[in-house]
Amino acid sequence: MGKISNQAVLQKITARFADQISVPAEPFGLVTFETKPEHIIEVLTFLKEDKELKFNYLTDITGIHIPEQKLSIGVIYHIHSLANNIRVRIKVFLDGNHPKIPTATILWEGANWMERETYDFFGIIFKGHPNLVRILNVDDMKVFPMRKEHPLEDPNRVDKKDYFFGR
């Protein structure tokens, strides 16, 4: 089993996609970078099919909502090279009003359920997905529960008033 360093992975990715990736870093030793939705399939395909890198295992796809940012919805991919025992995290940020990104099911069939779950909780549309329907929430639900669009507590609760706490 060959090993490859984080620096070698970053150098190879940067050499191939210099203008298509940004913010390359290694937080907690995990190679991380960002790309745009129009480049994600090309980047994932390169990482999967490169003879040296061999990122053949899709570990996870999830979402994130950061309302303070202009591009407030993020799709986070975690992929693993079993041959080199190294992982990569790829972030793609989208417009919160119309979050759309191409599906990764063309590369990994296992992306199907991960993308459905991400759609169900964050409302991200995976273009080209074979069956993008809710998977855990009820079908007629109109909101996406992991988005930070609603107050965490009911403001009308009387037991949370300041005067109960001496304020």
Image: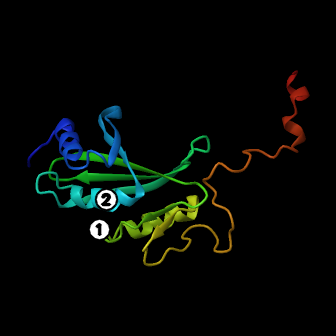
x then y, percent, for residue 130: 43, 78
x then y, percent, for residue 47: 23, 55
x then y, percent, for residue 4: 14, 42
For the residues labelled 2 and 1, say whether their Cβ atoms are less than 8 Å apart. yes
Task: Report the quarter where the C terminus lies.
Answer: top right
Closer to the N terminus: mark 2 or mark 1?
Answer: 2
Q: Residues within 10 Å of mark 2 (few under 14, many from 20)?
A: many
Q: Is residue 7 above or below residue 82?
A: above
Q: Amino acid at mark 1?
A: Leu
User: Circle 1 sits on which residue?
Assistant: 107
Label 1's element? loop
Figure quadrant of residue 28: top left
User: Circle 2 sits on which residue?
Assistant: 58
Whole-number angstrom distance, CA of label 2 to CA of label 1: 9 Å
Q: Is residue 43 visible?
A: yes
Left of 52 or right of it: where is 129? right
Q: Tell which residue pokes out farthest to the left in this image.
A: 1
Left of 49 or right of it: where is 154? right
Q: What residue is shown at x 88% (from left), y 45% (from top)?
A: 156
Q: Residues within 10 Å of mark 1 (few under 14, many from 20)?
A: some
x then y, percent, for residue 84: 15, 48
